[in-house]
Image (cartoon, coloured by chain):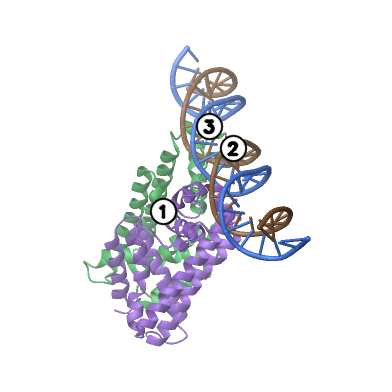
Chain colours: A purple, B green, C brown, D blue
Amino acid sequence: MSSSSKESILAAAKRTAQAHGYSGLNFRDLADQVGIKAASIYHHFPSKADLGAAVARRYWEDTAAQLDAMLAETSNPVRCLRRYPDVFRRSLENGNRMCLCSFMAAEYDDLPEAVKKEVQTFADVNVAWLSKVLSAAAVVNSGESEQRARAIFAAVAGAQLMARSRSDISLFDALIDSYRAAGLLPA
Amino acid sequence: MSSSSKESILAAAKRTAQAHGYSGLNFRDLADQVGIKAASIYHHFPSKADLGAAVARRYWEDTAAQLDAMLAETSNPVRCLRRYPDVFRRSLENGNRMCLCSFMAAEYDDLPEAVKKEVQTFADVNVAWLSKVLSAAAVVNSGESEQRARAIFAAVAGAQLMARSRSDISLFDALIDSYRAAGLLPA
DNA sequence: CATTACCTACCAAGTGACAGATAGGGCTTG
DNA sequence: CAAGCCCTATCTGTCACTTGGTAGGTAATG
């Protein structure tokens, strides 16, 4: 099979968690989406916590791959910085969904330990990439690039959250423009 | 009684929703916190949706009062802008909680209509206050103050979300400092 | 070749815990 | 007595998770 059940479960769980969070994941809905029975999911994932951790891990792996691909095709770091918000924009385009790890950051208190770890890694991956690109672009003094990277990550995540609550993708674009106008992102 | 059950329920629901969201609210826990039985909550709120809406409404009312009080005691608008992030900081101080409406913004798809409305009003109240203060401080051209207000609100909410997921209040402070350094907030 | 063993993938049926919500009764206070 | 407040008991539904299986494929053994 080109697409195994395990992959289908991960894909369905990603879609669901981006709209309803970790607490919104449930085995019946997931199984229905995949076309199997709920009990069968336990053949692939021993528990909901393991499934959640696998989904979050896959999520940051995919994001890291996207970012690296962007850097590979456009070696111009300023161009990459300008395109960074598009990663978050695409979730909004896709049914007003949001970053899985932003949602899980809100649910943090109720997350199994293994899931918490992956959620933090997502932030780490984003900050590391931004920091590298900021250094290359020399938009801030080196040494301040990690601080600025964190600020950009947090601000873009906040913009996504606000735009989602209005189901208004143009609000996201306007917020990013404001960040540029204010000097947080390169114009 | 100086503190009625209704007020106690609202207070408990606020605390719980700030840590676990709307989906994390449940009548049994709430009743335990207040010292009554779950069924008794229905005497004060006809349904969970009504309770949620009441909590969210109370939340933006309290925030609006805080902001207006700040403006009243310090008529200096730049000082007010510098202190704005403290409103969000206090939630983190209070048991690593977050803004109730940021959490509910994430849960947006699953919110009853009445709750959605109050969540949006919270954002409106913040943006309106920021816009007013920005105009008074003349930190941006008038006409751009509402755009900048939205950007500040979104960025501060994002900073709170990121800091919460690390249980690190100093990360929040660092992010706000970075926003100032970048020029999003007045230094 | 045939038997035995084991594996992956799935499912039917059910467990106990917990969710929101309801019905109807009792106590207290003005 | 009537209204406000809270109770017990219960209903219905959903949750994660378990048990005990079936069907089909692979592979080693005699």
Q: Amino acid at mark 1?
A: Cys
Question: Which residue matches tag 1?
Answer: B101
Spot occupied by residue A14 in the image (x, y as percentages of width and height): 45, 59
Mark 1 or 3 closer to N-term?
Answer: 3
Q: Nearer the viewer, residue B173 or A185?
A: A185
Using the rendered view, name the quadrant where residue D30 is placed: bottom right
Q: Give the number of marks.
A: 3
Whether the residues at callouts 3 and 2 have beta carbons within 8 Å, the answer is no
Q: Nearer the viewer, residue C16 or C7?
A: C7
Spot occupied by residue A164 in the image (x, y as percentages of width and height): 35, 57
Element assignment for label 3: helix
Whether residue A97 is visible to the viewer of this picture, yes or no, is yes
Q: Chain of mark 3?
A: B
Structural crowding at the residue carrying mark 1, measured as other residues with C-alpha within 10 Å and reported as few (<14), some (14–19) or many (≥20)? many
Element assignment for label 2: loop
Q: Chain of mark 1?
A: B
Mark 1 or 2 closer to N-term?
Answer: 2
Using the rendered view, name the quadrant where residue A18 is placed: bottom left
Q: Disc 1 to disc 3, how far (Cα)? A: 26 Å
Q: Amino acid at mark 2?
A: Gly
Question: Which residue matches tag 2?
Answer: B35
Spot occupied by residue B28 in the image (x, y as percentages of width and height): 56, 39
Using the rendered view, name the quadrant where residue B102 is placed: bottom left
Same subunit, tags 1 and 3: yes
Q: Chain of mark 2?
A: B
Same subunit, tags 1 and 2: yes
Element assignment for label 1: helix
Spot occupied by residue A71 in the image (x, y as percentages of width and height): 39, 81
Residue B39: numbered disc? 3
Q: Nearer the viewer, mark 3 or mark 2?
A: 3
Q: Amino acid at mark 3?
A: Ala
Q: Disc 1 to disc 2, how far (Cα)? A: 26 Å
